[in-house]
Amino acid sequence: MTEEEVPPYAAGCMKCELAGQRRRMVWGEGNPGAPVFILLDNPGAREDKDGQAFVCGTRDTLQQGLRETGIALDQIYVSYLLKCRPIRAYDKPAARAACSPHLAFQLERQKPRILLGLGNTVVQELYQSEEKDVKSLRGRWHDYEGIPAVFSYHPLAVRRRPVLMRYLLEDLALVREKLMVLAP
Ligand code: SF4
């Protein structure tokens, strides 16, 4: 998938301490006009090293799930709560709060039809509640700022606990079903 350039307004963002840790910003990847916006917590090592082809567990597992459920890559766009990869310990609430306007900008501009949030960090940040988790929210539709939303396990959690793959596939199947309803 093609990485999207950081928009000029955000290039060189210094709004949180990750500006001092990052190698680069990773804005998003895939089709910005796609109906499905997949949200992860932050870029991983592969995304951080532009052009470096090495195995990325998140990507492998996510693409396996998409393949198995029949969701084409041009139907998705992938981005992050944080556009910079943390290298060292940092103030997580402050960084997420600082970066949230970038996500709001993306959602407003791209107007995805479906939001797929992966992992507890995403759930807790979107709903501003540490009480929320994937386990209690997955498997059914929710609403996030007017966007139909599904939540599932982070691909790295699925790799660590393969038993979770069936839940990720079930949640991706929900997305695929809605995509079929939305199709013109
Ligand atoms: S994580 Fe977000 S808010 Fe912090 S420097 Fe990077 S782009 Fe800016």
Image (cartoon, rainbow, N blue to C red):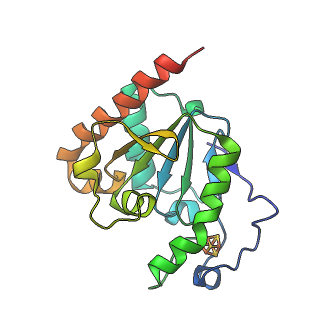
Would residue 25 appear left or right of 5 to someone viewing this image?
A: left
Q: In which quarter of the image is residue 97?
A: bottom right
Most extreme residue toward the front, as rendered? 146
Q: Looking at this view, name the residue that lies furthest to the right.
A: 8
- Locate residue 133 relative to residue 26 in the image: left or right: left
Q: Name the outermost residue toward the top.
A: 184
Quick one: quadrant of the C terminus? top right
Ligand 1 occupies quarter: bottom right
Left or right, 114 with reference to 160: right
Placement of 179 over or under 103, stated as above or below: above
Which residue is depicted at the point 58% across and 32% down? 35
Residue 167 visible, this angle: yes
Which residue is at a point 55% across and 33% down the rendered structure image? Answer: 113
Q: Quadrant of residue 163?
A: top left
| Foreground residue among 181 and 173 | 181
Extreme-left residue of the structure: 163
> Is 61 positioned to the left or the right of 79 in the image?
left
- Residue 137: x percent and y percent? 28, 47
85, above or below 89, in the image:
above
* Quarter of the image that includes the N terminus: top right
* Residue found at x 24% / y 57%: 160
Query: Can residue 26 be seen here?
Result: no
Placement of 81 over or under 30, stated as above or below:
below
Residue 158, horizontal then vertical, whole percent: 27, 50
Q: Where is residue 119 in the image (x, y as percent from the top left)?
A: 35, 56
In the rendering, at what x and y percent does residue 57 appear?
39, 54
Would you identify the image quadrant in which residue 169 lies?
top left
Using the image as rendered, state which of residue 170 and residue 136 is in the foreground.
136
